[in-house]
Amino acid sequence: MTLLEQEHEDFRATARAFMDREVVPHHAEWEAAGIVPRELWRKAGEAGLLCFDVPEEYGGLGTTDFRFNLVLSEEMSRAMASGPGFPVHTDIIVPYITTLGTEEQKRRWLPGCVSGETISAIAMTEPGAGSDLQGIRTSAIDKGDHWVLNGSKTFISNGINADLVIVVCRTDPDAGHQGISLLVVERGMEGFERGRNLDKVGMKAQDTAELSFDDVVVPKENLLGEEGQGFVYLMQNLPQERLSIAMIAVTACERLLELSLAYVKERQAFGRPISKFQHTRFTLAEMATEVHVARVFLDDCVRRHNEGTLDTSLASMAKWWTTELQTKIADVAVQLHGGYGYMMEYPVAKAFLDSRVQTIYGGTTEIQKEIIGRSLGL
């Protein structure tokens, strides 16, 4: 059964042309700089590559068909464009505003998110709290007509460029997970500071920052959803986030397989292409099989997500299994390339470095297995 229809393939042509024109020629420069220019976001907005689920009245496509998100991930992976944080913005953050925002919030924020004028981030992770969201210490005190926010966050994707940051914080220190709320902090608010643009192992062109909040006055109108329901909202949105990461993983695996196949057919050893050696053929046969299984699994998850039946457990299965496969396939691809695979001028070396974080962010592999185990009654 074919997952994609003609409208998705038409969108693919737009996305591919954009990547080839606006991203590929400049990506190495952005990796050196550690950030992509804001102008790229505006161009992506003009091309219709951002925030597909935003209703038309706010400038979006008004579709919840996640196959468009899948196609964009595929084309970004094909271009090996790990820098632009479009999936973080479109798949993970803006849906919080679309689903939880008041009419006033939607009119204030969504048009800019769609146009690329407004870049978003979500601040969950803290120096002392990663996958354990209940360990969050960032706090907001109710002062009547505003909140006073204090705390620090780290490893925040889009953190340097972000104009809107959804901050996960405690509004009731004694209520456990029921004391967590979501506050939207805007660029320019006094006391909101950005620290270092973090120097990562891979994904060099995507800005990832430390953020600090020192007595930041946040208007009551910037509370997203209901007070004390933040943990529930995070749990509701995490399956889509994990599916988005799985989409990146599977398409990266497919790209690595393509690169490896091309290389072994050209590379000579002992007077013949290394593709003629049985070990190489067996290795690639294993890679092709595993990548195909991953694609079938992913397509099923996307189909289920569109139908509203992708549950937390299945999303966790997809996230951990496909990202672990990505790191495995990247490692094998480097080995097949030999010494050249260790050279940064070869795309497999970059893919190897970019892949490593996939099993960590969005909830580590161990956390995903814990979630699945609990769903099994263990």
Image: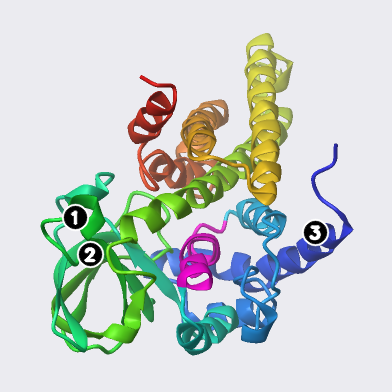
Residue 360, located in which quarter of the rendered image? top left
- The spot of residue 257 in percent (x, y) is 66, 34
Residue behind mark 1: 136
Q: Residue furthest right?
A: 6
- The spot of residue 279 in percent (x, y) is 63, 11
Q: Callout 2, which amino acid?
A: Cys
Disc 1: CA contacts within 10 A as few (<14), some (14-19) or many (>=20)? many
Residue behind mark 3: 8
Q: Residue furthest top?
A: 278
Closer to the camera in the image, 91 or 40: 91
Q: Does the residue at mark 2 contact the one at mark 1 (Cβ under 8 Å)?
A: yes
Residue behind mark 2: 169
Indicate left or right for 115 with 222 as reference. right
Q: Is residue 273 visible?
A: no
Q: Callout 1, which amino acid?
A: Ile
Disc 3: CA contacts within 10 A as few (<14), some (14-19) or many (>=20)? some
Q: Quadrant of the C terminus?
A: top left
Closer to the camera in the image, 108 or 346: 108
Give the answer, above or below, for where 250 lies relative to 136.
Answer: above
Instruction: Tell me which numbered mark, 2 or 1, is placed earlier along the sequence.
Output: 1
Residue 273 in magenta? Answer: no
What colour scheme was applied to this rendering of the protein?
Answer: rainbow
Q: CA distance from mark 3 to mark 1?
A: 40 Å
Circle 3: element type = helix
Circle 2: element type = strand
Instruction: Tell me which numbered mark, 2 or 3, is placed earlier along the sequence.
Output: 3
Give the answer, above or below, for where 149 lies relative to 95.
Answer: below
